[in-house]
Amino acid sequence: MTGQAPSRNPDGIRPPITLRPACPKALDRVVMRALQADPMKRYLTAAEMAADLYSDLGDMAVPTTLAPERGAGAEDRLAWEKRLRRALGDDYELLKELGSGGFGRVYLVRDLALEREVALKVLHPYLTADPAVVERFRREARVAAQLNHPHIVNTYEIGQRAGLLWYTMEYVRGRSLGSLVRSDGPQPLDRLLRVLRESLDGLQHAHGRGLVHRDIKPENLLLDDATGAVLIADFGLVLALTGTDSSGPVSQSGTPDFAAPEQLMSEHVDGRTDLYSLTLAAYYALTGELPFGAGTVESVLARQTAGRLPDLAAARPDVPDAVLRVLSKGAAQLPGERWASAEEYARALDDAAGPARGPISRLLGKLFDVS
């Protein structure tokens, strides 16, 4: 850019723009950061340097193939945090890590422009090395962001910088159903019925707009500490990272412990797949045990096809027989034998639970805060 060799003393290197005024400011800034004397002040990876350059030069896609090779530091919490802080820049303040999983990590951050706390899920770079996956993720996140329902976690914004891809969503102050079961054991029937009803309400809204969750599980059912309300998290993420084929939406990546048989066999999935997974989550909440035990996809599928669900009546004699029959149909092995829709499932549940737990009770609960 300048026709001059840089000084051997990093502190004496002159910015290219002072020697060649036509040099783009973005390029000048990136070069000077890459030549910092302190290695910790330079870019961590080629992907980060490329993303920083492209973000200033214009609307160009970051070559995600520049993701760093998997190494010892790839899963290191502090390395993740340092890289993410650089990527977020002045847009978000990183407050703390909320959790991690196969898709990446979740952090509590403060949106500095809107002055609010949000949850930020950053995807693992190795999941987004394929540009097609990145495009699917953006498309699915845009669809999920259109969902506006009191029992679905709101998706706010998609971001990409420094070789990282993330999205922000509503921060629910509370715990997941899975966390509650692990700490407190089997859940009271009244709480479980509320979880089911509100989850079905959210699923009805999503299914009516053509969006299937594909990974309903206790960890994705969040209970708000203040109101006790249930919010479903992570709509659209599974499909975004696995894709589709000509037969329709298919996913084999849903959590095996709660996935439907057709999902584990990579067959066509629809709203009834979510209803099956929600029912298994209900069994787990009532018993504290995985309905078909833990293990690989193959072992879970074998136990599903070998027999019926565990004997819930013996484990929870307080559950009415009518409710047991509703749950049994919700977890039928064949999609055609399950409830046809979330709305039908919810009506059957109200009828089975009796008028004391039906729609009138829910209305009174909203008016007088009766649970």
Image: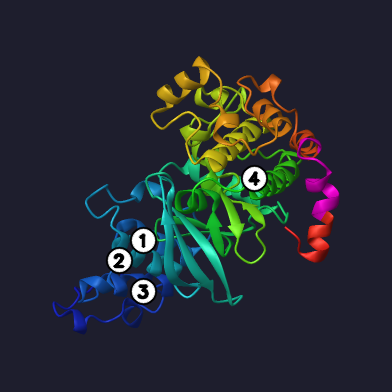
Q: Nearer the viewer, mark 2 or mark 4?
A: 4
176, 194: nearer the viewer: 194
Q: Which residue is mark 1?
A: 48
Q: Which residue is mark 2?
A: 43
Q: Are marks 1 and 2 in contact (CB under 8 Å)?
A: yes
> Is the residue marked by circle 1 packed among few (<14), some (14-19), or many (20+) residues within 10 Å?
many
Residue 181: percent from left, percent from top: 50, 48
Residue 193: percent from left, percent from top: 68, 45
Q: Secondary structure at mark 3?
A: helix
Q: Which residue is mark 4?
A: 189
Q: Which residue occupies the extreme top position in the image? A: 306
Is residue 347 something one can see in this rendering? yes
4, 181: nearer the viewer: 181
Residue 174 lies left or right of residue 199; in this view the side is left
Look at 57% across and 65% down and name the residue there: 173
Instruction: Calculate the distance from the C-alpha at mark 2 to the C-alpha at mark 4.
Output: 53 Å
Residue 344: percent from left, percent from top: 79, 33
Residue 55 lies left or right of residue 209; in this view the side is left
Instruction: Calculate the distance from the C-alpha at mark 1 to the C-alpha at mark 2.
Output: 6 Å
Q: Which residues are magenta?
A: 351-362
